[in-house]
Amino acid sequence: MMALSERLLERLLLAGAALLALGCLWGLWWWQIGFDPRDVQWWKWLIASLLHPAGLPQPMVWAAQGCLIGGLVLLLAIALIMRQARNRTLHGAFGSKDLHGSARWATFKDVKHSRLLSKKAQTGAVVGGWKQGKTHHQLRHIGPEHVMCFAPTRSGKGVSLILPTLLSWQDSVIVLDIKGENHALTAGWRASLGHRILKFDPTSTEGCSRYNPLAEIRIGSGRDIADCQNIASIIVDPDGKGLSDHWMKEGWSWLTTSILHVVYRVHLTDKRRANLADVRRFLSKVPPLPVNTGEEDLAALFSADFEKLLKEMATFKHGDPVIDDAVRTGIGGMLKKVHTERSGVHSSAVNGLGLWADPIIAANTGASDWTVEDLMNGDDPAALYLMVPPSDIARTRPLMRIVLTQIIGRQTEKMEFKGGKSVKSYRHRLLLMLDEFPAIGKIDVLQKGITFVAGYGLKLFLIIQNTGQLEAVYGKNNGFMANCNVRIAFAPNEGADSDAEMVSKLVGKTTIVQSRRSASDGKGGRMSDSLQETGRALLTPDEAGRLRAIQENDDGTVTPGEVLTLLTGRPPIRGTQYLYFQDKTLLERAQMPAPAAPPFKPLALPKEEPHAHSPDRPLPHRGRPSARPTGPRPGGPRPGQPAGHRLAGRPDAVADAAPRPASGGSGGPDRPGGDGDRGPGPVVRRADPGGRPHQPAGRRPG
């Protein structure tokens, strides 16, 4: 009924428009020549004039043409209005064109409005490219918002995003550089700007900017216990899955106590900073082993030695009553445990320190050539390249997690306010370019801090191969996607259906308007035209998988691939990758040689002590075997050692020791900072802060 009344109204309006045009024509003719449509003589004259070769007078022709054109315009306007009325939304806030979705691809005008082409953004992070005619523009983002990129391997993310960014970003930067190519191609240019170049490759013997995580423990600040707890939690839980059972929780508590004690003891006695190799030697050293010791006697020996060590730790004066109490509390918990439980807790604490049995790792973490504070508050911006070969990613995962946890945690500890608003407390912004960051395990402070670190001057640029890689480490509801205002997507790999669907959903849906014609059956059937609105994804999953990939041609040239750049609140940008080697300026910067890293500095080997029960050596008062032999030993017993001794013929007589830092004090590292450290001369008794001398200590828990 409503449709019938609308059609009748449309016909009446059209008829009225025709009559209005005719009335206007008659009025003009009456005004020009006195034409009276009521007089038959005027109609006869009009017909005769139309048939006459001379035709109507010119003024009448002009009037007729004007009324005809005006009438047609009026009829067309009425038809369009009625058509819009038929297609209107009867209820709701959306028009028919947006009924099923309003997504559309960005135009060049939209790209300019997004401020990705502004002059201010020319030193920002590269988030895509746009071709306008013959000009290829870089799309750069300079704001504090974070960036998330989904890019499969060999998709061109390095040459189109990472390298162009590192060759233009002028503040501080941290680069997770697993392959080492980012350091090789960008460190030279950054050094030419006066930036401090830090190459932290803990497995390298060819030079490394050393970093000692224990040097970041703020002794005497009130935060030292928390610093120790953070380090211990990562060592005990290397994959970041949480302290899930009793042994891990108790191991974390015991390792925290041990780190706290070693840090203060080395600081007071050796006047240096302890390192994690010191902690490992402290917890792993074995007592002197008499010849022909039975199994029960051996267990009793280790148990008694460990109890002596606990009591010695409890009586050590750390120079701070709070630290003394914390250490005694941790030791009390161990003393109350039965032997079997104590052994399990101790093993949980020591297992994670196995990485520092590697003398290269121990050397590159034995001291610090830079501090966390240098990154955002140094005199000059810094570029920290975290490098580790793919073959060593798994075993160095705890160390990399410690480094990033300390950096992010330290930079977000406090915020300053002035004049009713926050003010920056840093000198340089810090970009974290973390390519394939799930490979180094879960970093809790990164996941939790992504919601607020931007306010402290940190900008995250996170790159993953696919969502499955991210969810395997951080879970499905990880919050990374929701807190990254800029998202970049390359063509997903075949088989990655979930990623293709995700990209399709991110781009959104649009409304398609289709014209349809139908005919009724039977004689006198009528044709009718109609418009139908349907919804479809602006980019379907299969279309997402067919985005053009970067391609090397037969003539050696490279054709950039497509890249999607999505900004919150803006139409999606379907652009073209901007390759750094196709830009003359960026290519020249990439060709600058990287500066040499500081030379490798191995830790000094500890001095050997007289072996217990050697026939030609006196038995030390509280001595112990050397932590590591100074050179290779053949298969026979060493001079002065009984042939039947259980350690005879083993080149690794007592393992679990790492070399001693060259910067250490006069004592050796067999017991970090311990009073039983041996030098080349006689044992020197040191005095504690109260002036009371200590007896040399010599034994370790088993």
Image: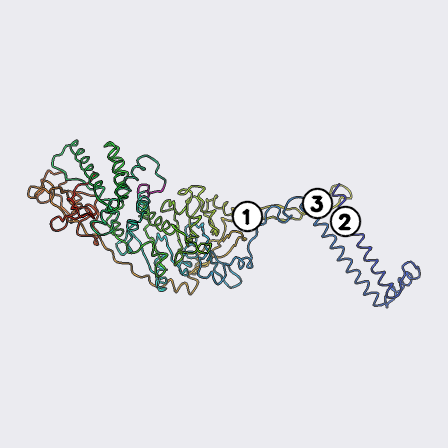
The image shows residue 441 at horizontal and vertical percentages of 36, 45
The image shows residue 605 at horizontal and vertical percentages of 18, 50
Compute the Cα span from label 2 to label 3: 20 Å
Single out the mark in the foreground, 2 or 3: 2
Q: Nearer the viewer, residue 205 or 145?
A: 145
Compute the Cα span from label 1 to label 2: 37 Å
Question: At label 2, which amino acid type do we have?
Answer: Glu
Q: Which residue is mark 1?
A: 508
- Classify residue 35 as left or right of residue 484: right
Q: Secondary structure at mark 1?
A: loop
- Where 206 falls versus 494 (above or below)? below
Q: Secondary structure at mark 2?
A: helix
Question: At label 3, which amino acid type do we have?
Answer: Ser
Q: Which residue is mark 3?
A: 518
- Classify residue 682 as left or right of residue 567: left
Q: How many marks?
A: 3
Q: Which residues are magenta?
A: 233-240
Q: Which mark is residue 10?
A: 2
- Classify residue 536 as left or right of residue 60: left
Residue 601 picture quarter: bottom left
Q: Nearer the viewer, residue 207 or 425?
A: 425
